[in-house]
């Protein structure tokens, strides 16, 4: 760096003070964009889950009407799966809180 450039740099005004309102506005815009993306993703996941559940219920009702004896066993097995999954979820929550 040449001497005259160095002298100009040293004589220059200091950086302007940070504007807290501007910083807050930038953070709010970033958070709003993140929130919109998360909301959109949740909506898409929910819609996809609803479509899959509707398709599953349609197929399940068609199968159950043809196989009534097997439907009782299937319902009991489904309840057992939900009970085990719920217990695992509660246990995982307790383990996460403990750590």
Image: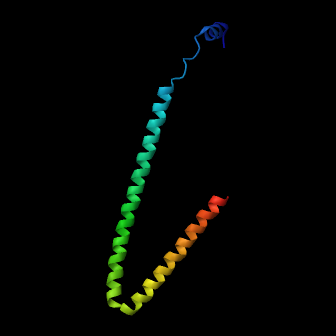
Tell which of 93 and 11 is nearer to you. Answer: 93
Q: Position of residue 95 (x, y in %)?
A: 64, 63
Q: How many marks?
A: 0
Q: Position of residue 55 (x, y in %)?
A: 34, 73
**Picture layout, residue 18 above or below residue 10:** below
Tell which of 4 and 62 is nearer to you. Answer: 62
Q: Position of residue 49 (x, y in %)?
A: 39, 66
Which residue is found at the position 42% from the left and 48% from the top?
Answer: 37
- Taking the image as shown, residue 98 lies to the left or right of residue 36, namely right
Which residue is found at the position 45% from the left and 31% from the top?
Answer: 25
Q: Residue 16 lies in what quarter of the image?
A: top right
Tell which of 25 and 94 is nearer to you. Answer: 94
**Picture layout, residue 43 above or below residue 12:** below
Q: Residue 53 lies in what quarter of the image?
A: bottom left
Q: Quadrant of the C terminus?
A: bottom right
Q: Position of residue 60 (x, y in %)?
A: 36, 81
Q: Residue 63 lies in what quarter of the image?
A: bottom left
Instruction: Give the colouring mode of the picture.
Output: rainbow
Q: Quadrant of the N terminus?
A: top right
Which residue is found at the position 46% from the left and 85% from the top?
Answer: 76
**Picture layout, residue 33 above or below residue 63:** above
Which residue is found at the position 59% from the left and 63% from the top?
Answer: 93
- Taking the image as shown, residue 89 lies to the left or right of residue 45, namely right
């Amino acid at each position: 760096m040449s001497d005259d450039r160095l002298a100009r740099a040293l004589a220059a005004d200091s950086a302007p003070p940070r504007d807290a309102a501007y910083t807050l506005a930038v953070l709010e815009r970033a958070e709003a964009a993140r929130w919109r993306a998360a909301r959109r993703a949740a909506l898409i996941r929910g819609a996809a889950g609803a479509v899959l559940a509707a398709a599953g219920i349609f197929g399940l009702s068609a199968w159950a009407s043809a196989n009534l004896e097997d439907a009782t066993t299937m319902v009991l097995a489904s309840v057992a799966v939900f009970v085990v999954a719920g217990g695992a979820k509660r246990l995982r929550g307790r383990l996460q809180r403990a750590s």
